[in-house]
Each structure stands twice: as structure tokens, then as C-alpha cells.
Amino acid sequence: MSTETMEGVKPVGLPRLNEPAPEFEAVTTHGVIRLSDYRGRWLILFSHPADFTPVCTTEFIAFAEIYPELQKRGVDLLGLSIDSVYSHIAWIRNIKEKTGVEIPFPIIADLNKEVASLYGMIMPGESKTETSRCVFVIDPNGILRAMIYYPLTTGRNMQEILRLVDALQTTDAHKVATPANWKPGDKVIVPPPTTLEMAEERVHAGYECIDWYLCKKEL
Amino acid sequence: MACISADGTLTESARRMLEVLQNPATPEDVAQATGLPLFRVRSGLREMAQAGLVEEKEGRYALTEAGKQRR
């Protein structure tokens, strides 16, 4: 019996944070790639609704613009849509011809929706044939660390994606959390104490504290 | 395919990888030597292993006889 619903979209469970990102092998504009090929590097896997569409084109140009900054941070990019590899190639070549921007990262041709289904990229309420604007940040150990979902109408904010990567890498490096609107150079949050004794000690530990549960420090 | 075209010819990136593999090397070594991204090297070596041009032993890749002839 088929697992597809009457609408033709397979029911999926969304991937979960801090669990292994679902493994896949997919045809891309750079050959057949597995998720495990990125092991040891950070990866941003992102989907777009369709090739040769206006918002997606602005996003691809913007992703290409932040690509050098991502590379400095040890982050690779991998796009995805439910289009053929020939469509992807034609679109990339068109973007270069019309704007001069070279797209340096591969794009998955997910015609059978296999990867899109694994990652819950299709929102049937929006479209049953296109992926929404999803972003999955996967760490060097293959663990899914963050997800962002935007609707078809709204292009993503590349500075927020860079900020998210910076925050995750800062958290890993220093065992801290980051406050609202944090950006590199700002003070970070010291993880809150978990016992009464630690709480008493925390307020005298020399941090900048509002109270025992909200203390910040410089890095 | 990224390394071997439908007519059997090797792409430039494939030839660069095979050149490095004159001496057995890890994917990380090949990425460093060629300047190709690590994911491309892992994917390409897998493809060339399936085609019988390279073989992997304990994490290091080496040319097969067929690979030596194609280099």
C-alpha cells in the first residue's frame, strides 16, 4: 500500500534538532553527493521553490555573495529544489550570463522529492509541487543544529544565516549561549546555574549579572 | 557523473585527482593538493572507485592499473 496521501504528498516527520540529520544520496550539479561527504565540515542545506523564479534568483545571488564568508567559517552550501539537473544547469548559466554572478555550490535535483520529504521541506498548504524556503544547519558531526522555514513569498536574510552560524560556532567553542540580537563581539550568556549553591556563587563570580539566572561575559 | 562523462572521458577535476594519487592519499590530502572541496573529492573518488580507476585501503586511495593508464 502506498504511503502517499490523496494529495500525492508523502506524510513526513520533521527532522529534529540535535539529532543526526537524515542521510541521503542525491544527484546534484556537482555529481552524486551523499550527506556524509560533508562530514568534518559545517553544511547549510537549503531548499528553494523552483529554478527561474524571481525571489529564488535574488536568493541565489545573495547566497553566492556570502559564500566566501561561509567558507571562512568552514561552512559549505548545498541547494535543493524539485527540478531536473538540466534545469539547474540552465538556470545557473543564465544567472551568470545575466548578472555575472557565479553560483559556486551544488544544487540537488530532487525530482522524486526524496530529500525534500526526508527533511519536511514541502508544505502542502503552500504548494504540493515546490519546496518552501528551508534552511538546515548541520554540524561537522552530521548533527542537525538549526532550522529556518520561510514561505514562498519571502526571501531569506543572509546576514541572519551568517549570524546563526557565528552563534552556533561560538556556543560550541566557548560553552555559552547567545542573547537576542547577538552578533560577534557582543557579550555572551553564561549558562545558568543548576543548583542553589551554584546560584549563590554565580552572583559573586564577577560576571555582569541582572540576577543569578542572567549573567553575561565578554569573550 | 562528475568525473566520468557519458562517453567515458575524464573531467579535468578527475584528472587532477588521479594525478595526486600517484602516491596513495586520503581524501583530505587530495582536497588539499587539488584545491577541490572535500565533498567533491569524496564524491569523485567514490565514482572513480566504482569505475575501477582507484581503490581504497584503510582510508587511503590508490590508482588501479586501469587508473594508471587513464591518468
Image (tube, coloured by chain):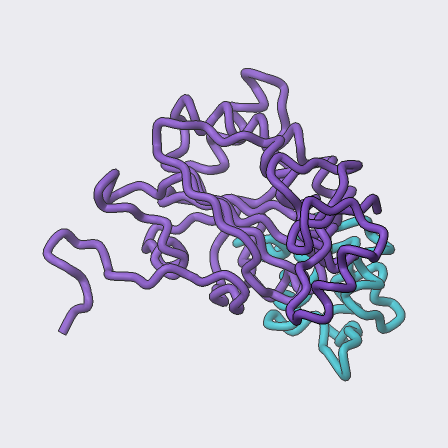
Chain colours: A purple, B cyan
Quarter placement of the N terminus of chain A: bottom left
Answer with the quarter of the image where residue A133 lies.
top left
Q: Is residue A145 above or below residue B24?
A: above
Q: Is residue B40 visible?
A: no
Seen in the image, is A219 located left or right of residue A139?
Answer: right
Q: Is residue A146 visible?
A: yes
Q: Residue at x 80, y 70 (%)?
A: B26
Q: Residue at x 31, y 41 (%)?
A: A130
Q: Is residue B51 above or below residue A88?
A: below
Say which of B62 and B32 sits in front.
B32
Residue B6 percent coordinates (x, y): 52, 54
Q: Residue at x 51, y 64 (%)?
A: A21
Residue A54 percent coordinates (x, y): 41, 22
Q: Residue at x 42, y 38 (%)?
A: A48
Seen in the image, is B54 located left or right of residue A19?
Answer: right
Residue B22 percent coordinates (x, y): 87, 67
Say which of B48 and A128 sits in front.
A128
